[in-house]
Image: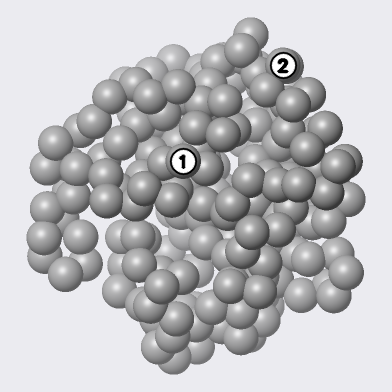
Amino acid sequence: MTASMPSPVILEGDAVRLEPLTPAHVPDLFLAGGGDGEVWRWLPVRTPVTEAELAAVAHFLIEDAAHVPFAVILKETGRAMGWTTYGDVPGFDESVEIGWTWYGRAVWRTAVNTECKILLIDHAFSLGFNRVLLKTDNLNTRSQAAIRRLGCLHEGTLRRHRRRPDGTWRDTVCFSVLDEEWPPHRARLAARLAEGAAPAAV
């Protein structure tokens, strides 16, 4: 178990603001990605095709003690464009996961994902965590490439880790970054953002 899960907090960057996920975000979130199978393709739930279905998934994350979910607010519009979470990492001390991340297509291949990851990783290490875990489906090569571009190292692959919503088995690819490894990667990512270039969204 982690020492303790992070408390809900607002994290603010230039392009995005991360704020605790609430039911009030659901209408914007449904407009951003509801019913879009490609947006939800790699998440562990079926694509929500109604606002009520999306609200049920949000409620699960909000109520689950093992997750601290954030709505991703695009500052330019003030609208929620996706969500991301901190998650507990059983079996590891002072380790936290970033996961359950999705963004509406309108912000794919923009600065949004990179800035969200910088905010979340910075905050995790400021709280005393020493390792941040990110993991993804072994078939999701786009996500794996984006995670590697953050500076995370491949730790291994969990074979037949869990079933996908369609019933097939998923192998899970695990990556991490340690606190002492993060500063040069952060500097590189910040420089890319300043130049107007950003890695593709996870």
**Which element carries disc 1, helix, strand or loop?**
helix
Q: Amino acid at mark 1?
A: Ala
> Element type at marker 2?
helix
Badge 2 or badge 1: first in the primary sequence: 1
Residue drawn where x is 30% and y is 74% of the image: 46
Q: Position of residue 140 (x, y in %)?
A: 34, 52
- Hey, which quadrant is residue 186 in on the image? top right
Closer to the camera in the image, 2 or 35: 35
Q: Nearer the viewer, residue 152 or 26?
A: 152
Out of 22 and 42, give the one closest to the viewer: 42
Horizontal relation, residue 140 to residue 166: left or right: right
The vertical placement of 3 against 31, above or below, is above
Amino acid at the residue labelled 2: Pro
Task: Residue 56 in the image: state x and y as whole percent.
Answer: 43, 76
Q: In the image, which disc is placed on residue 171?
A: none
| Residue at 86% across, 42% down | 195
Q: Residue furthest top?
A: 180
Instruction: Name the spot of residue 123 as percent of width and height, x first.
Output: 71, 31
Q: Dots 2 and 1: beta carbons under 8 Å?
A: no
Q: Is residue 91 left or right of residue 58?
A: left
Q: Mark 1, residues whose alpha carbon is within 10 Å: few (<14), some, or many (≥20)?
A: some
Q: Residue at x 80, y 34 (%)?
A: 190
Task: Report the residue marked by disc 1.
Answer: 145
Looking at the image, residue 193 sits to the left or right of residue 116; the answer is: right
Give the total of numbered labels. 2
Residue placed under numbered mark 2 in the picture: 184
Within the image, what quadrant is residue 42 found in?
bottom left
Around disc 2, counting alpha carbons within 10 Å, would you say few (fewer than 14), some (14 to 19), or many (20 or more)? few
Eye-nearest disc, 2 or 1: 1
Q: Is any atom of residue 164 visible in this view?
A: yes
Classify 192 as above or below 152: below
Residue drawn at the location 88% of the way across and 41% of the way down: 194
